[in-house]
Amino acid sequence: MQCAEDHQTVLVVVQPVGIVPEDQFFKIYKRIASVSQVIIRESQRLLIRYRHHYLPENNEWGDFQTHRKVVGLISITTCATSKEWPQTAERFHGQKEVYSATLYDSRLLVFGLSGEITEQQRTDVAFYPSFEECSDVEKRVEDFVESIYIVLESKRLDRATDKSGDKIPLLCVPFEKKDFVGLDTDSRHYKKRCQGRMRKHVGDLCLQAGMLQDALVHYHMAVELLRGVNDFLWLGAALEGLCSASVIFHYPGGTAGKMMGRKQSISQPLDAGKRHRAGALTTNGISADTSTEIGRAKNCLSPEDIIEKYKEAISYYGKYKNAGVIELEACVKAVRVLAIQKRAREASDFLQNAVYINLGQLSEEEKIQRYSILSELYELIGFHRKSAFFKRVAAMQCVAPTIPEPGWRACYKLLLETLPGYSLSLDPKDFSKGTHRGWAAVQMRLLHELVYASRRMGNPALSVRHLSFLLQTMLDFLSDQEKKEVTQSLENYTSKCPGGMEIITLPDGLKLPPVPFTKLPIVRSVKLLNLPVSLRPHKVKGLLGQNISNASPFIYSPIIMHNRGEERCKKIDFQWVQGDVCEVQLMVYNPMPYELRVENMGLLTSGVEFESLPAALSLPAESGLYPVTLVGVPRTAGNITVNGYHTSVFGVTSDCLLDGLPGVKTSGCLVEVIPALPRLQLQTSLPRSAYTPHPMSKEELSTSVSVQLFNGETQQLTITLENIGSEDIETLELTSKIVSTKEKVFGEFLSWELDEALSHLPLKPGQSVTLTVNIKVKLDFSGQENLLQDLNDDGISVTGLPISSPLRQVLKPRAETKPVGSESSKAEYSHIKTLEAVLNFKYSGGAGKVESYYRELSLGVHVDVEPSVFFTRVSTLPATSTRHCHLLLDIFNPTEHELTVRAKNNQDLVLHASECQRMAIQVDKFDFESLPQPDQESVRFSNPKQLEEERQHAQGCQINSKLGICWSIPSLRRCGEASVEGVLNQLVLEHLQLAPLQWDVLVNKKPCDCDVIADCKVGDAVSLEVKLTNRSKNSVGPLALNVVPYQDYQNGVQNYDLEDGVTFIGSNTFYIDTVKPNESTVCEGALLFLYTGDFYLNIKFQDDSAGRELPLAWFTLPSVHIRALDTPPQAGA
């Protein structure tokens, strides 16, 4: 389409003659067109407009507006031989005949001909050997333009100097010729019309010749003349000429815009456009640049007047239906001027008028051209959506049903150009932020048309890309039915051409970015999961240099901290392990109204080599947040970054990056992958349990075992450790810890020997080793006093004492009291207690061990402890020997089975269910002083109560080991130990303690203890020795002992009046000097029995003895029993 400054150009047609290669033709055409203006005689310039295609009927309008007249012809031809030359020359002549009525001059450029013919000196023909060897084409064109100027100038002078007496020809347009037949040519009206039209014609010639002032004068005169005779068509042309000249004056830079604008005039300075424009916008419309332009500006229209004159001219054109093209072009020229003046609203009025101009029967190509130009003009004034509308109309026109071969490629190209006008782009990133821009309904319609056009072009990949874009960006605006239809279409397309993430490049260089389906499904959060507790790596603590950066000699450097800001995303405080499956949890939901199948979903990572293990999932319709776990295996160590995920939905593969998903919550995407570590799996001989120790979670235990034991019972747990990883297990440690128990445990709850298992290290992959752990439960065996609140000692049968009654009375409940086996008492004694412990296996190996990492595997042990026996009461009885003691235990059977209790050197005690009996056990007194004492360091840092507990515990252990009390339940084939550690009170411990002062009494050189009866003959002297051994830490003495004989009648009567029966040889008092620690002393004496009988000696300490501050138990001497006989005792009696 034309612009106002085209009025000052001359039209030159460049056409091929004969067969000329298209690329070569346009190569020469571009060189010719580069000569767009020529300076004539250093003062005048001629502007040229070139066309390679121009309809001859348009040339008939050359008198109406001279810039429409073809005044020059340049023909391009190829000629291989001289024989072809005559035919070529004839064709050139025929071509000139087409434009002969208006042609000023012509040229023929012949390529490929050589010889004599080329030596002919012809101004209108130029010969070149080839298309490459034609360096002076531009020079010849300039000469040609100069010749045109000479003709133009002569015609201008010829027409401008016409005398009024001469007859002026009537210029007319093609459709007027028949109307002027038979008119009176001598009338004043006719002559004025001829003068007016000629003035307008001369104005055109002056404008083309570069004489702007003259042109303005002629146009003004023509307007006055033509207005007087109501010659509206030519009046419009004169007004348009006046507007064009004024536009050329005000806007020397041109009005065609960036795309179609001509270079600025060489004769004008580069800033002339700005200068003139600024001057043109003054109130009176006169440029104030130079005095030479004042005269010119007098006849020049102001910018506002230009538009008014254009409106007037267009209104005159509108009166003639055959002038539709002229009217349309005038509208276009006015719009371009208004665009420069930034008067978009008024420009749109002109364009709206242009839309409704009837141009008669247009070809489809002309219709496309018309709508395309309207679109460009709307774009020029900033009406982007209106521009896009007409561009889309042009696109639809390309594939109109009336066209035998629809131009789908042209349609597609035009549709792409409409996208910006509808706020659409082909990059889905533009739709991921902020609110939606544009009208979604129109955008969807346009995208559907792009899909259809690309399919008709035979490019299914384009169809898939546009349909994917539609589904991704317009999902929120699609109805349920539309979603279903779009996805069905997409599946149909992708069955033939799967969609991917590659960039599609169109032939014109436009690149279509990939469209990842970030909304199918929508991901709300991404969370990297830690490894299961049993597989988590731990760093060996306390190793110097393990955490020191190699980049710095300092332990801590703030520079290291600052580098964290350079990381792409937050680093997570746990580690993954090379070769182990790692998990990332995504919270997703399906926005579609039907089930969504995601066939291939995996992770996108960088940093280390990573093997993603894709998952397939099916999400229900419009599901809520749904957890999806994606897994993979890092194959190398280092820092790994989870960049996003990939999916395959509806046949389209998508790579969804988290950077492009601002709505996704994440706690960090960067995690360290440490070198490979071995993996240990354990199997146990005991059944697995669902119990979890209270402070721990199920995740922390790899497995748990459960067993029910009676108190004191021992169970063996066999653990099989198997290396199921790919690295050798080089180190193995085992520790245990009792958790969540309020019960006091005696002895070792869990014990094992690890040496045998360690001898099998390193453990190769696939190999296993077994380990035996002993579970020994020893809780408190003490019972409550209220169990026997209604019982006295007579109701308890005592076993184990030689002096016990032969009648064994079994405990029986009284009628008036609750039975011992009733629910209330059973609830107290049958209460199952729980013991829980954790076995912790610490192991390492492979490359991870080199980096000081290890793993832990935890086994929970849950033991339900049922009571086996209770010691309800414990007491002591003195034995006949000072070095022995009887321990009395009241034993209760809380089980529902018959139970047997045994102790060392003691007969078995059988207890029925809920039965209580007393057992007497003779024990040697204990030398507690020989127990190891705590060192000074521990005494200093321990409180007295703790020290006392430890001392009692050590004493209890010693006593328990000597007693060796065991129980068994024959019916269940269960047996175990019973411990008295928890039931011994301080008084009992004192009774069981061996006194530090050891007293030995010898009668006739024989020890007298443990019910030993010393025999002697009446009348013989009996020697008596008292030996004291001091095992205390202090010296003892001096001491005095009295020996008092008596007889016991076994009826409670004791006779101490034995002066006639026993006499002492010497004194009956023994004196002992001071005895130092670990030393001993002996006192000797003798006595004589005067008649037969059983005599007893009571050895007492004198009250005034110096040793009375010592405990009484230290001065317990053995009882002495002597039997005096008439005859000497028989051997073995």
Image (cartoon, grey):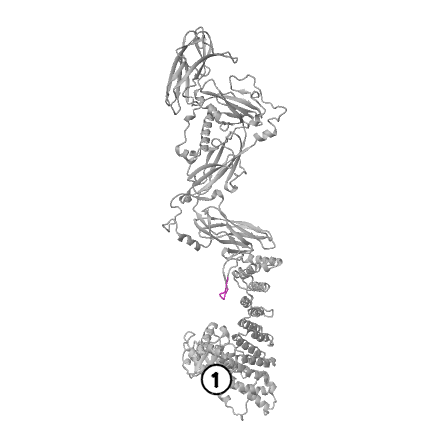
Q: Residue furthest right?
A: 816
Q: Which of 216/24 is in front?
A: 216
Q: Which of 557/725 is in front?
A: 557
Q: Residue furthest top?
A: 1127
**Residue 114 occupies quadrant:** bottom left
Q: Residue furthest bottom?
A: 165
Percent position of residue 369, x then y: 55, 73
Percent position of residue 508, x then y: 49, 66
Q: Which of 392/690 is in front?
A: 690
Q: Residue at x 40, y 47 (%)?
A: 547
Percent position of residue 450, x then y: 56, 64
Indicate the quadrant containing the C terminus: top left, top right, bottom left or bottom right.
top left
Which three-letter amino acid code belongs to the residue tagged 1?
Ile
Q: Residue furthest left?
A: 553
Is residue 624 visible in this depiction of the protein? yes
Report helix, strand or loop for mark 1.
Answer: helix
Residue 507 inside the magenta-drawn segment: yes
Residue 406 inside the magenta-drawn segment: no
Residue 386 placement, left or right of 28: right
Looking at the image, is 302 positioned above or below residue 891?
below
Is residue 773 visible in this depiction of the protein? no
**Residue 568 occupies quadrant:** bottom left
Percent position of residue 760, x then y: 42, 36
* Prevalent SS, magenta region: loop
Residue under numbered circle 1 = 294
Badge 1: residue crowd in 10 Å (few <14, some 14–19, many ≥20): some
Residue numbers of the magenta segment: 506-512
Looking at the image, is 277 positioned above or below residue 965?
below
